[in-house]
Amino acid sequence: MKRQLGVTLLELMVAITVLALLLGIGVPSFTNVIRNNRLATQANELVTAFNVARSEASKRGLPVSVCVSSNGTACDTASPNWANGWIVFTDTATAGEVDGTDEVLQVTGRLAAGYGLEEAEVGASFIQFLPSGLAEPAAWRRLQLEWSAAPDGRRRCISVAPGGRIGTTREACT
């Protein structure tokens, strides 16, 4: 008698049930991992912009600013919203404005849908770094990046100290 190779219908149904259980447990936690990584990536993009501005100010010997920009060419001063994007530019004439002699060094577009970025304190729509490495205005600046759909309020606090130091924490800005 020849031996038959294959699986029975019962074995196939058990295997599909086990696979469905594993996917039901694994997919939601994997989704949270992806969202946490997106949050960290977007926070790192802003930190990178601040680091580029600080290093370029030191290298070029002139002020370099990071400001809110929805179009990638000029600063949004009327209704600044950091979630719309930002630019890094040399800031030689009027502080916080892209003038005729200024050069745009880096452009970052909108944040992904579902994420918000707001100033934790009321302040300017730009942060300027001087050639000495100090930040202007000479006050702590904190920006809070938040995933708005998170039930536990996942967020990152990005801070710029008056001395120019840039840091992030995994909690709300205080």
Image (tube, rainbow, N blue to C red):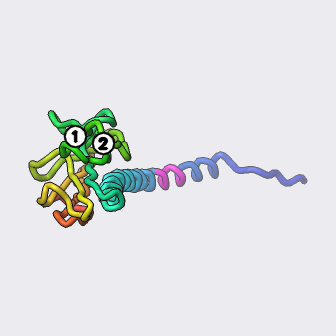
Looking at this view, name the residue that lies furthest to the left. 122
Q: Is residue 77 magenta?
A: no
| Residue at the (33%, 53%) spot, across then down | 49
Quadrant where the C terminus sits is bottom left
Q: Which residue is identified by label 1?
A: 97
Q: Upstream in the sequence, badge 1 or badge 2? A: 1
Residue picked out by circle 2: 102
In the image, which residues are magenta?
A: 18-23
In the picture shown, does residue 91 fall above or below 140? above
87 to 159, vertically: above or below = above
Q: Quadrant of residue 133?
A: bottom left
Q: Is residue 39 visible?
A: no
x, y (%) of residue 40?
35, 56
* Position of residue 151 in the picture relative to residue 7 (left or right): left
Image coords of residue 44 (percent x, y): 35, 56
Q: Main secondary structure of the magenta part?
A: helix
